[in-house]
Image (cartoon, rainbow, N blue to C red):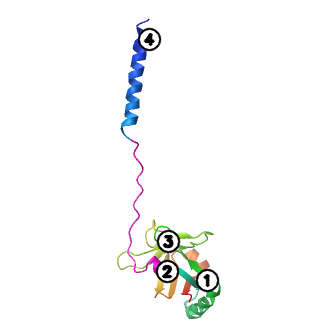
Amino acid sequence: MNVFFPVVRLAFAAVLAAVLAGCASSPAPQPIEPARPQYTSPITAQQVVGKWGLAAYHRPDDAARTEAQARQGCRQPYVINAGPSGGFMMYLADDAQPSEVISKQVGNGPIYIGLADEPPGAQSDREVVRFDGQILVLKWVDQEVAGRYGTMVYVRCP
């Protein structure tokens, strides 16, 4: 029995040394962050950041009147700030905090504004109906949200 314990101790020490050597030889692999999809769009964050008057309409006949109302909204402007990752900060439907969004387009298709990790035309996106640098008109993709919020008209404040 005296021979048995030293052999067990020696085997235990060898196993422990092997485990410790394995831990010290290579660090654990770090998780790789998935790449963000790259979209093209003629609208840049710099073109959108700023103060905007905001109004909305439900009937296309009200578009011109709503644009005039949006100009009056500059008294209490809707502020679009730059986002931390190169996008811009806007409120999504029913969210109390702004989210970073981007302008996204595939090929010559429609332009959308929405979350970077969602494909263009996702339910939380808004389609760009019109943009000329001074006026931005957005229509919600989700029909239920569009029914509640209407078509949004943003007019750049002086």
Q: Amino acid at mark 3?
A: Val
> Image quadrant of residue 99?
bottom right
- Badge 3 or badge 4: first in the primary sequence: 4
Q: In which quadrant will I find the N terminus?
A: top left
Disc 3, SS:
strand
> Image quadrant of residue 44?
bottom left
Label 1 crowd bin: few (<14), some (14–19), many (20+), radius 10 Å:
some
Pick the front one: 12 or 101: 12
Label 4 crowd bin: few (<14), some (14–19), many (20+), radius 10 Å:
few
> Image quadrant of residue 42?
bottom left
Q: Which residue is mark 2?
A: 48
Q: Amino acid at mark 1?
A: Pro
User: Residue at (39%, 66%) from the top-left corner?
Assistant: 37
User: Residue at (64%, 87%) from the top-left corner?
Assistant: 75
Q: Which residue is mark 1?
A: 77
Q: Is residue 57 visible?
A: no
Label 3 crowd bin: few (<14), some (14–19), many (20+), radius 10 Å:
many
- Badge 1 or badge 4: first in the primary sequence: 4
- Badge 3 or badge 1: first in the primary sequence: 1
Q: Amino acid at mark 2?
A: Val
**In this picture, residue 115 sits left or right of residue 55:** left
Marking on residue 5: 4
The span shown in magenta is: 27-47
- Badge 4 or badge 2: first in the primary sequence: 4
Of the two numbered discs 3 and 4 in the rendering, the one whose residue sits closer to the viewer? 4
Residue 30: give x, y in percent of width and height: 41, 48
The furthest residue to the right? 76
Real-space CA distance between mark 4 and mark 2, rounded to the nearest whole angstrom: 76 Å
Most frequent secondary structure within the magenta stretch: loop
Disc 1, SS:
loop
Q: Which residue is mark 3?
A: 101
Q: In which quadrant will I find the C terminus?
A: bottom right
